[in-house]
Amino acid sequence: MAAKAGTTVKTNPPIKGLDGHTFTAPGPSKETETEKSFEITATGKIQVGQFIVSQQQTDAFTGDPTFIIHPPTNQLRNDYFILTPKGYKHNHCSVLRAKGMAVKLDGAVIPNSAFKPVGSGNWELAYVDVKTGSHRFEAEAAFGLSVYGYGSATAYGYPGGMNLQ
């Protein structure tokens, strides 16, 4: 969703139906479906969200539709306190960091081998399994965090937090 008409988005790698899309009016959303992780940039302000699909669309037949808002990079934090609830078989976090930056989970550095390049190469993404309960993620600089989990016909997802400005 764009704040102004004429805003154009670019994705890296190119995502069919989204890369190069120009919004003709503020407000209407643009949807695409992909299993790829990608970087998105725009010529103006945009709001990015992610739908997690329902159990009928997964091989493991778990989950339920979930929507996660992704904050813009200027609203990312350098520390997050999160809670993963009881009753979900799988609890995960997506950690987005600047290339090579150390990020800690509960005081232990997440191994560099867990991170893979995404987009232009300035960013790296790791998918981290977490247990039920409270957790702290921290780093010397701002990074992104999404928290999500799946169960039988149920799911949750949320941004780890954001610095509202």
Image (cartoon, grey):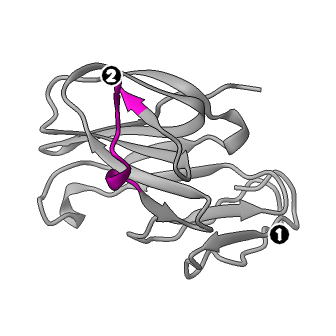
Q: Position of residue 65 (x, y in %)?
A: 33, 50
Mark 2 to mark 1: distance in Å?
Answer: 45 Å
Q: Which mark is residue 106?
A: 2
Q: Nearer the viewer, residue 120 or 133?
A: 120
Residue 138 is covered by the magenta coloring: no
Task: State the residue position of label 1.
Answer: 24
Left/right placement of residue 55 relative to residue 35 reads: left
Q: Residue at x 35, y 22 (%)?
A: 107
Span shown in magenta: 104-115
Q: Position of residue 165 (x, y in %)?
A: 77, 26
Q: Is residue 60 left or right of residue 150?
A: left
Q: Is residue 92 left or right of residue 32?
A: left
**Front in this rendered view, residue 11 or 63:** 11
Q: Residues within 10 Å of mark 1 (few under 14, many from 20)?
A: few
- Amino acid type of the residue that numbered disc 2 sits on in the rendered structure: Asp
- The residue drawn where x is 47% and y is 30% is 160
Classify residue 1 as left or right of residue 83. Answer: right
Does residue 111 show up magenta in the picture?
yes
Q: Position of residue 77 (x, y in %)?
A: 60, 29
| Residue type, mark 1 in image | Thr
Q: Secondary structure at mark 2?
A: loop
Query: Of marks 2 and 1, which one's residue comes earlier in the chain?
Result: 1
Q: Secondary structure at mark 1?
A: loop
Quarter-of-image position of residue 14: bottom right
At horizontal 53% and vertical 43% (from top left) the residue drawn is 101
